[in-house]
Image (cartoon, rainbow, N blue to C red):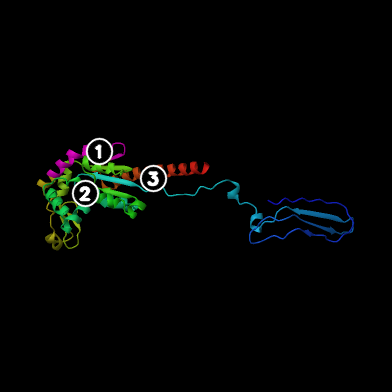
Amino acid sequence: MASVGMSFSSVAAARPTPSLASSPSCSNNKPFASLHATRSLETSRAPLRLEISYDRWFSAELRQKPSAASRSGPVVAATEPEPLKIMISGAPASGKGTQCELIKKKYGLVHIAAGDLLRAEIGSGTENGKRAKEYMEKGMLVPSEIVVMMVKERLLQPDAQEKGWLLDGYPRSLSQATALEDLRIRPDLFILLDVSEAILIERVVGRRLDPVTGKIYHLKYFPPENEEIAARLTQRFDDTEEKVKLRLETHHQNVEDVLSTYKDVICKVNGDAPIEDVFAEIDKALSSILEKKSRTDSASMAAGMSC
């Protein structure tokens, strides 16, 4: 830093007598020998001599006053909280699809449905797809080894890592949950939609698919707009009462084991309630997690800056 000394004294008139030991170099801003300049300031009264001493030369930028930020200490940059990692589970027709759309719309998570991944394998006619179809037609769970690596690879894709993920309908058994735990894949929240069995059967049996538009209807709750659409509706092979009862039995046998794996992060929601009420409860839980993540990230950053 430059040190400046100033002295005033009454002197006789004199000419300026600057002396320079060496010149500054603007290219490297290195210090140089002291420069002393004396100049007489003549007035009607006794002349004054102003002497200024520079110990170092430095650029104009370095001579500027420090900013308010630099005077107040380090500034901690604002960061986004870590993305959400959510699992949602429930029996067939428990409302997972509807709630997933609402969650995805508000929180921007990547929706990953294990059922869609399986159907893609079946549609491609792969060996795994053929094996999976046999189990699905019997209302049984597909073996974990067919699905687990496929799920893992999807969760590790850049979009899921950046935006966070919403894993729909997986895991469905203790072996699947254990496989994910072994891969260090664990959710922030495990949402369980709890719906009575009578309502589940009614929802499943009444579902119909429009093969032209791909739209899903329900004969009671969401009937087709006209007779033309109604005439072409089809029913999925596993949406019969017999098949759904088998699927529900399998679901109930395994759900307790899955819940035991995630007992510290479970959010059990009454799925019999209206759609908006179900989502309000889910939304409250997700917002709470984001707030906690934000506070944790801010505290960690502040601690790191103070070290």
Tell me residue 168's x, y (percent): 25, 48
Q: Which residue is mark 2?
A: 147
> What amino acid is labelled 3 in the image?
Leu
Tell me residue 233's x, y (percent): 13, 59
SS for callout 3:
helix
* Viewer-nearest of discs 2 and 3: 2
Residues in magenta? Answer: 246-267
* Cβ atoms at labels 1 and 3 below 8 Å apart: no
SS for callout 1:
helix
* Cβ atoms at labels 2 and 3 below 8 Å apart: no
Q: Is residue 113 above or below residue 304?
A: below
Dot 1 or dot 2: first in sequence order is 2
Whether residue 14 sits left or right of residue 105 in the image: it is right
Residue at position x 79%, y 59% in the image = 19
Q: Which residue is mark 1?
A: 259
Dot 2 or dot 3: first in sequence order is 2
Residue 236, image quadrant:
bottom left
Using the numbered discs, state the Cα–Cα distance from disc 1 to disc 2 in whole angstroms: 19 Å
Q: Main secondary structure of the magenta part?
A: helix
Residue at position x 15%, y 54% in the image = 127
Q: Nearer the viewer, residue 88 or 147?
A: 147
> Could you tell me if residue 101 is visible in this image?
no
> What amino acid is labelled 2 in the image?
Val
Q: Nearer the viewer, residue 162 or 288?
A: 162
Q: Residues within 10 Å of mark 1 (few under 14, many from 20)?
A: some
Tell me residue 218's x, y (percent): 17, 53
Q: Nearer the viewer, residue 258 or 211?
A: 258
SS for callout 2:
helix
Residue 290's label in the rendered image is 3
